[in-house]
Amino acid sequence: MDKEGSSHEPRIPAGGWGSIKEVSTILLEEKVPPQRAAILLKQNKPDGYACVSCAWAKPAHPHPAEFCETGAKATAWEITSKRIGSGFFAKHTVTELEGWHDHDLEDAGRLTVPLRYDAASDKYVEIAWDQAFSEIGAHLRKLDPKSVVFYSSGRASLETSYMYQLFARMYGNNNLPDSSNMCHESTSVALPKSIGVPIGTVVLDDFEKTDCILFFGQNVGVNSPRMLHQLQEARKRGVPIITFNPLRERGLVSFTNPQSPLEMLTGSETRISTQYHQLKAGGDTAALMGLCKAVLEEEDAARKRGDPPALDTAFIEEHTHGLGAFKDKVQATTWSDIEQEAGLDRADIRDAARVYMGAKAVIGVYGMGLTQHRNGVQNVQMLVNLLLLRGNIGKPGAGICPVRGHSNVQGQRTVGITEKPELAPLDKLKEQYGFEPPREKGLNTVEACEGIQKGEVKALVSLGGNLVRAVPDHGSMNAAWRALPLSVQVSTKLNRSHLVHGKAAYILPCLGRIEIDRQGGVEQAVSVEDSTGCMHGSKGMAEPAAATLLSEPAIVAGLAKATLEPNPKVDWDAWVADYGKVRDAIARTYPEIFHEFNQRMWTPGGFRKPVAAAKREWKTPTGKANFTVPDGLTVDPDLQDGSGTLRLFTVRSDGQFNTTIYSLDDRFRGVKGDRMVVFMSKADMEARGLRDGAKVSAVTATDDGVERRVDGLRVMEYPVPPGCIAGYYPECNPLLPLWHYAKESYVPAAKSIAVRIEASA
Ligand SMILES: Nc1nc2c(c(=O)[nH]1)N[C@H]1C(S)=C(S)[C@@H](COP(=O)(O)OP(=O)(O)OC[C@H]3O[C@@H](n4cnc5c(=O)[nH]c(N)nc54)[C@H](O)[C@@H]3O)O[C@H]1N2
Ligand SMILES: Nc1nc2c(c(=O)[nH]1)N[C@H]1C(S)=C(S)[C@@H](COP(=O)(O)OP(=O)(O)OC[C@H]3O[C@@H](n4cnc5c(=O)[nH]c(N)nc54)[C@H](O)[C@@H]3O)O[C@H]1N2
Ligand SMILES: [Mo]
């Protein structure tokens, strides 16, 4: 375990001076004047705006500056002084823009006017808002509702999202895929079966009470840096943090708090992980099986010795179901199989188990390292199994903590953005709005892509995001996308999805959440849900990028009015004039969660939605928390280990937010000016006769007759387990087959792609 260093791995802690430098650089590059930059002090404050970056919890008693490097970059990116209007589009054809790098597209500036694609000139041309709405509405009215997809990326507010799902359902489908389908859907499928809720059970307070934290496949220093405050405080109390991750991620190694003058001056850093296990990508079910095996072995040994049990027997008896079958599976699994699949020694797994058993309250944190695998659902359920063995769900300081991505991705599901009709309150919508909601299952993201490939999907409306770049299989998807009869993008910045567009294509530019949203002269507020199920109000603070922009609620209402027959029970205009009325409507649909929404939305720290499992109430068919028996350790039928195949997992850097590339550097991994890299172990380089810096191609190792390759990758020697390599998302997405997704949840298995490496000629 804990193998230090290679030629490239920087020794810097997360946070620290590097973080401050990064923030000032991006503010300068985006030409954000100091008085505008000052609004950063209102980020994630009870009277401020909710950061547009990640979904991590917002404390009731925030730090003086409750923002991180990542959040400050996202803010600078949105409140940039750069603008693109009709002049920009008159200058550049779409074909020319296609040759631009993703970074340069978004860096051109904020979109300011509604645009329609003009095939004759191959350019986007300005169009009036009313005309855009009426043309799109006329097009949608002609289509079979089943052939239209309403995608959303997880940033739009609760108010916008509620209006959007209602629009889709009144139009006639449940085709409401979202970014969560590529992200934590494995969580949303796994947890209800195991513990009867689709979300995590911990709140911030639990981090103050815990005495052990397990970390599986989540890169806190880059993707949710504000959480480092909780981890640093826990470490100061001596709480062990045990990490399972194939890469040694700097933010999981050490942290210097940029908000502590003393730490900054003395250069002192907190060691974050007390144990760091570099398991094989896809080895988590095996590692978790090993942890459970060590606990169950200790239980037997303790019984023989007459010592207190290693299991929480009272909890298991009263609250769980299925331990017997799970135990049989654990016993039937050999240590040598576990070692082989996890790529870890049993002694190291036992070390981790010993610390786990020594703790009274344990939190299990995880991210994409568990969910984006063929067995992503099982990975999550195995973590639950481990926690259940010692009663670590539903008591202070303990629980399961999926770290969500987009700032309101969890909230969108809460207010009805889902393709699964059983998760939406259809009867309630019927009663409230007097229409017959569609009952048929809608398309998720993978199914929407399949539909686009087959030509069955005729229109794609996107509320944010950059779907064409976020999905797998760019080679075939890009071509299929261009055959779509209609694409409509509600966006803040220019991206690939505007260029790889449908035959009729519209870009509808919107206000961002950081901007002041005035309706009839009155400033409006919106709300979002964080990773811990807490709802927060958010008030824009910056002047809008352009007077021509509309808010997201106004755009959704504009589309709905132009598409749907009038319904006396849905007054879209009244909702746009006063978002408080949308919140009243949400409260009527979901009274248990959102009662007195308008009064409670400014509660410091947010108001929490009820999470039954956190109170040890189990809304599962057995009425208990369920142990789940895994199918087996073999990670993935699509991975053909051996014969020179490597497992590629795709990761993010601190220089990006998903497909938004702020910079080509990755300061935590020592990459400068180029994201076309592949991180490889010394052993795998030697086996292939590759030098550091060698140029290679990656080719997907599948036998479906499709060639998937990415050329021009530079090899970087890095401490990653032999047999596994890492590359960047989205650059490596052409290698990911669309059919390579998690069973049950359909999350593309972006963390385990079988590839071969070929030296470039
Ligand atoms: N700065 C920044 N912040 C972000 C984002 C961003 O792009 N940039 N994106 C946002 C979004 S939408 C999301 S979903 C989250 C994503 O945040 P994370 O969940 O942290 O996602 P990733 O960076 O994709 O990968 C997570 C970690 O999993 C590890 N890993 C890879 N394969 C495996 C495996 O098989 N097992 C284990 N145990 N670990 C593995 C990788 O080494 C990496 O450290 O972040 C959000 N926040
Ligand atoms: N290989 C691989 N693929 C992956 C992943 C991976 O780890 N590996 N991760 C997956 C995950 S977890 C996710 S969540 C998806 C992300 O997929 P998406 O959510 O679809 O993509 P983003 O890159 O977040 O979208 C960026 C665009 O959103 C628009 N935007 C920004 N702010 C706003 C706003 O306030 N309103 C509106 N309307 N638009 C706005 C801008 O135009 C910007 O260009 O990608 C998935 N794809
Ligand atoms: Mo995500």
Image (cartoon, grey):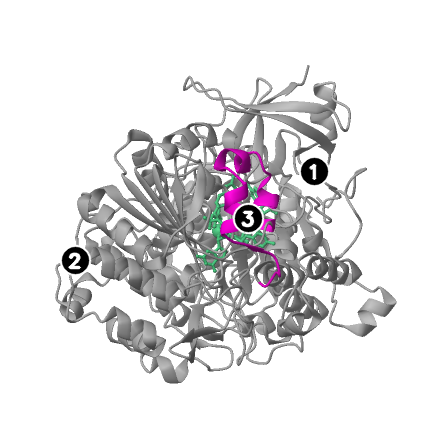
Left or right: where 571 falls relative to 650: left
Q: What residue span does the magenta drawing correspond to?
A: 79-107
Quarter of the picture containing the C terminus is top right
Residue at horizontal 56%, vertical 77%? Answer: 45
- Using the numbered discs, state the Cα–Cα distance from disc 1 to disc 3 in whole angstroms: 39 Å
Element marked by disc 2: loop
Identify the mark at residue 728; answer none if there is no mark.
none
Q: Which of the labelled discs sits on residue 437, or is there none?
A: 2
The answer to which of 321 and 717 lies nearer the viewer is 717
Disc 2/disc 3 C-alpha distance (Å):
46 Å
Q: Is residue 26 magenta?
A: no
Disc 3 marks a residue whose amino acid type is Leu
Q: Secondary structure at mark 1?
A: loop
What kind of residue is marked 2?
A: Pro
Sequence-wise, the earlier of marks 2 and 1 is 2
Q: Amino acid at mark 1?
A: Asp
Please tell me whether mark 1 or mark 3 is closer to you in this view.
Answer: 1
Q: Is residue 733 left or right of residue 724?
A: left
The quadrant in which residue 359 appears is: bottom right
Q: Quadrant of the N terminus?
A: top right
Q: Which residue is mark 3?
A: 291
- Mark 2 close to ligand 2, CB under 8 Å: no
Give 464 or 377, whichever is nearer the viewer. 464
Local crowd size for mark 2, using a 10 Å CA cut-off: few (<14), some (14–19), many (≥20): many
- Please give the name of the residue rendered at 61% of the width and 60% of the height, measured from the top-left corner: 80
